[in-house]
Structures are given as C-alpha cells and as structure tokens.
Image: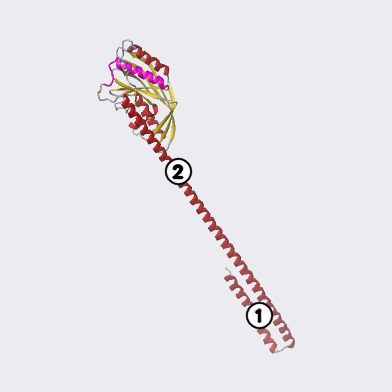
C-alpha cells in the first residue's frame, strides 16, 4: 500500500470517528442500563458534571497503531492522538457539548465542535480501538487491514437513532464508569432503545463474543496463510538457488573438460611435431651422407677426367636434390597431420 493510500485510510478513519455515522453499528460490549433512578440517585446535572470531570481528567489520548495488511504482507506504524476539550453540559436540554480534535502522525486531521443529545441516545457500548478502526476501514472497503494499539485504547460509543458519538480512554475502568453515567443520563432524559425487539445486553455480549472469535479466527487463518506463502517462497528461492548453483557447477565442469581436452590436443600436436622434427633430422642426415658420397665420387672423377665419372657425378647431384625434396615433402605432410 502506498504512503498516499495509508494516509487516505487514516483520514477516513479519523473523520468517521468524529462525524455522525448513519450506518448501524455492529453488536459491541453493551453497558446495561441501571435500574430506574430513585429519588436518591444522582440528578441529571450531577451526572453530566461527573461525565465532564472524568473526560476532562482523561486529557489527550496518545497511542501508536501497528498496522498489518494481511493481503500484501506490509507493516507500518501510525501515531494517533485524540483530545476532547471545552466540555459544556446543558441539563436543561439534555445535551453535552464538546470540541473534538484528532491527529495522525502529528498532522491535525479533525477539528470540530460536536454534542451528545442524551434524549436521542439509545445505548452505550465500549470496544477496543482496534475493533473500532476495523469497522471504519471495513466500511471504507479496506477489509485486509488489522491493528494493534499501544497503549491499549478504549472507544466509548454513544449510539443514537442515527449515527453515534465516540470518546476515548486509556483506562478501561474509567471508561466503564463514564459509560454507566451516560446510561443514567440517557434514562433521565427519556432516551434509550424503545424497540421491543432490540437485543438484550446479554444477547449483544454473546454476539460480540462470537464476532470477536470469528475475527480472531480469520486473523489467525490469514497469518497462517501468510506464513505458508513465506515458506513456499523460501523453498522456491532455495530451489532456484540450488538450480543456479548446479548450472554454475555444470558450466565450470564443462569449461574444465574443454580446457583439459584442448590441453591434451595441444600436447598431442606438440608430440607429433617433435616426431616430425626427429624424422626430418634423420632424413636430412641421410641426404648429407648421400651428398658427401656424391661429392667424393665427383672429386675422384675430376681427377681421373673420366667421362663416365662425370655422368655419375651429375646423377648423384640429381639424386641428392630429389632426396632433399622428399625430406621436405615428408616433413610438410607430417606437420599437417599434426594439426
């Protein structure tokens, strides 16, 4: 996934968290409503003041997202931060105003005013930030991404008839206390889920456990598939490396064999030429002997001044020339054969 794509995903995530969402949320960890408040229960003003104080004490929530793309196998880290400020309760209208700001990698992505209308709220759920991000990404079409936050962060979601509001906590116990206070405020303002067929908190909890189990199973299957692909890729690379090594060895062996053959042929040719040289030397010695004999006979003939001896001398000269030529021809034929 490119850097631009990653930033687009994060922007979609942050904007979806802060804005009003019209699609229905999946079953989460529902906070059961308390019994109908008695006269001694906290008033709406006191309840909203408690919410204001606890959220203010929470302060800015900073955390890192370790993101994994189960399809491409990529991993990257995103630094996130959320902050709720300017909390202003209005018990007379059952509205809690606040300002929300969100950062991604140090850049402000969301900066807006929002409010929680308790009279329109149906219920309150708490879910890990990883699940919250997974829902947002899935709706945006990024179904292969999985998250791990550090430190753990919990999203408190106030679900309305249309859309929802979310606040964020690093302390799950504080998140649960604020959620119970919000459920109490919803009851005091006449809100709540009036659907007679709406699932009970127990049913929602069971569905949430099933969903989490299915998600964990899918993530494990994806990890196993990725590990299997990595093993197969490693095996393929090992096979390719082995084949390349074998090819290299075969080439080296062929080269060595060719070099040995060339050396043997050269040695054989050299030995052949040496034999030709030896044979030619012997032939030339014979020619020299023949020449010396002819020369001696010629001297004798010259002394005797015999016509017969002169004819014999001429014949001897022709014989020596023929012998020399025969030696040369034989040597040439011999060396040609050595090639």
Which residue, as the protein is rendered here, is positioned at the far left? 196
Residue 273 seen in render: yes
Is 96 rendered above or below residue 294?
above
Q: Which residues are magenta?
A: 171-193
Which quadrant of the structure image shows residue 69?
top left
Front position in the image: 78 or 192: 192
Q: Residue at x 40, y 16 (%)?
A: 54
Q: From mark 1 to mark 2, how far is it between C-alphas?
A: 86 Å
Tally the numbered discs: 2
> Please, what secondary structure does the residue beneath circle 2 have?
helix
Which residue, as the protein is rendered here, is positioned at the far bottom? 307
Q: Residue 291, how many percent across, how many down?
A: 69, 79
Badge nearest the viewer, 1 or 2? 2
Which residue, as the protein is rendered here, is positioned at the far right? 303
Q: Is residue 339 magenta?
A: no
Is 50 rendered above or below residue 108?
above
Which residue, as the protein is rendered here, is positioned at the far top? 39
Q: Provide the residue designation for mark 1.
A: 320
The C terminus lies in which quarter of the figure? Answer: bottom right
Q: Find residue 129 and name its label.
A: none
Which quadrant of the structure image shows residue 77?
top left
Secondary structure mostly seen in the magenta stretch: helix
Q: Residue 310, how many percent across, how many down?
A: 69, 86
Q: Are marks 1 and 2 in contact (CB under 8 Å)?
A: no
Q: Residue at x 71, y 84 (%)?
A: 297
Q: Provide the residue designation for mark 2.
A: 231
Q: Residue 155, how many percent across, how many down?
A: 38, 24
Q: Is residue 186 magenta?
A: yes
Residue 70 seen in render: no
Q: Residue 156, how many percent across, how many down?
A: 36, 22
Instruction: Report whether 6 appears left or right of 280.
Output: left
């Amino acid at each position: 996934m490119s850097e631009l794509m990653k930033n687009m995903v994060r922007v979609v995530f942050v904007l979806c968290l802060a804005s009003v969402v019209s699609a229905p949320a999946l079953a989460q960890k529902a906070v059961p409503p308390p019994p109908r408040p008695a006269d001694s229960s906290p008033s709406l003003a006191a309840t909203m003041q408690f919410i204001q104080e606890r959220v203010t004490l929470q302060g800015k929530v900073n955390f890192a997202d370790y993101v994994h793309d189960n399809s491409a196998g990529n991993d990257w880290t995103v630094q996130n931060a959320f902050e709720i400020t300017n909390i202003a309760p209005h018990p007379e209208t059952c509205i809690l105003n606040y300002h929300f700001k969100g950062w991604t990698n140090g850049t402000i992505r969301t900066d807006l005013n929002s409010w929680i209308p308790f009279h329109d709220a149906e219920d309150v759920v708490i879910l890990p930030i990883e699940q919250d991000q997974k829902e947002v990404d899935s709706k945006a079409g990024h179904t292969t991404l999985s998250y791990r936050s550090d430190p753990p962060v919990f999203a408190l979601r106030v679900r309305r008839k249309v859309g929802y509001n979310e606040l964020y906590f690093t302390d799950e116990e504080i998140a649960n206390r604020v959620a119970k206070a919000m459920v109490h405020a919803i009851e005091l303002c006449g809100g709540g889920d009036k659907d007679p067929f709406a699932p009970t908190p127990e049913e929602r909890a069971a569905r949430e456990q099933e969903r989490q189990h299915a998600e964990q199973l899918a993530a494990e299957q994806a990890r196993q598939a990725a590990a299997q692909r990595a093993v197969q890729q490693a095996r393929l690379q090992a096979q390719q490396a082995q084949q390349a090594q074998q090819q290299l060895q075969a080439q080296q062996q062929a080269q060595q064999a060719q070099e040995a053959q060339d050396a043997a042929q050269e040695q054989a040719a050299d030995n052949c030429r040496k034999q030709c040289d030896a044979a030619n030397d012997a032939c030339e010695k014979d020619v020299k002997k023949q020449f010396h004999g002819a020369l001696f006979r010629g001297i004798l003939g010259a002394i005797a001044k015999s016509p017969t001896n002169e004819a014999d001398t001429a014949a001897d000269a022709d014989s020596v020339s023929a012998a020399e030529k025969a030696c040369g021809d034989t040597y040439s034929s011999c060396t040609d054969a050595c090639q």
